[in-house]
Amino acid sequence: MKELGKDKAATKSEPATENGVELPKEVICAFGEVPYEVFRERYADVYKQIHDMDHLLFGRITYTGKLGPKEFQMRTLKQQERALIASVIPAQNTDTFTRDMMLYEVYKVVLSLKAFGEVKLSPTAISLEEPLSVWVEKNKATIDTVMDFDETLTRHLSNIYEDISQAKQYAFMEILPNP
């Protein structure tokens, strides 16, 4: 199985370069294996926000896209949000691994998805002073909304979130000089 958001080894031809940094020729993402330039174009707004450095003031990148006729809005998670939901990720040899990974994807989508079509999500903020269970209880209705989504949609939105994170990394690579 190919890992989403990871660049493919540049064996077909030379990788793209920017500022002396090697960028992948192709990227495996939520939409399949695509040339880097197609990936960059799809997530152009993410690249623009990184290049403008606007996200440094707010700690988030926002992205608006479309899946079929439905427009959606996502945002990246803040460090404390990622830290707290990461506590759901189990050791790989547990009996609840699959269930816990699905919960992790649901929580990630709940926190990152602002809207999908007519559905608007507004979870309460995560606090590191409270256990994850308190946040889950406060956001039960929002979590139930995402749990009602088709499993494939939730997984795809989770993968798009990972693409946004990967686009951030590539955008930083483009603007930071290679030592």
Image: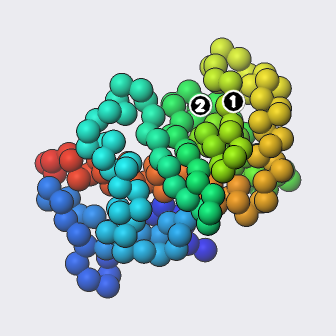
Q: Position of residue 88 (x, y in %)?
A: 72, 39
Give how far apart the Cα atoms at labels 2 and 1 are: 12 Å
Which one is nearer the viewer's eye here, 15 or 106? Answer: 106
Judge the density around disc 2: few (<14), some (14-19), many (≥20) Cα neighbours within 10 Å. Answer: some
Q: Position of residue 59 (x, y in %)?
A: 43, 30
Tell me: residue 145, above or below residue 22. above
Indicate the secondary structure of the residue bearing disc 1. loop
Q: Is residue 102 visible?
A: yes
Q: Position of residue 159 (x, y in %)?
A: 58, 58
Q: Position of residue 170 (x, y in %)?
A: 33, 54
User: At x 81% / y 48%, what residue is drawn?
Assistant: 147
Q: Which quarter of the picture shows residue 160?
A: bottom right
Q: Is residue 173 left or right of residue 19?
A: right
Q: Nearer the viewer, mark 2 or mark 1?
A: 1
Tell me: residue 106, above or below residue 155. above
Amino acid of disc 1:
Pro
Judge the density around disc 1: few (<14), some (14-19), many (≥20) Cα neighbours within 10 Å. Answer: some
Determine which of the numbered discs, if any, sits on residue 123 in the image.
Answer: 1
Q: Is residue 133 visible?
A: no
User: At x 20% / y 45%, what residue is drawn?
Assistant: 176
Instruction: Mark 2 or mark 1: name the one nearer the start of the chain.
Output: 2
Q: Which quarter of the picture shows residue 157?
A: bottom right
Q: Is residue 42 left or right of residue 69?
A: left
Determine which of the numbered discs, if any, sits on residue 81 in the image.
Answer: 2
Query: Residue lying furthest bottom in this view?
Result: 12
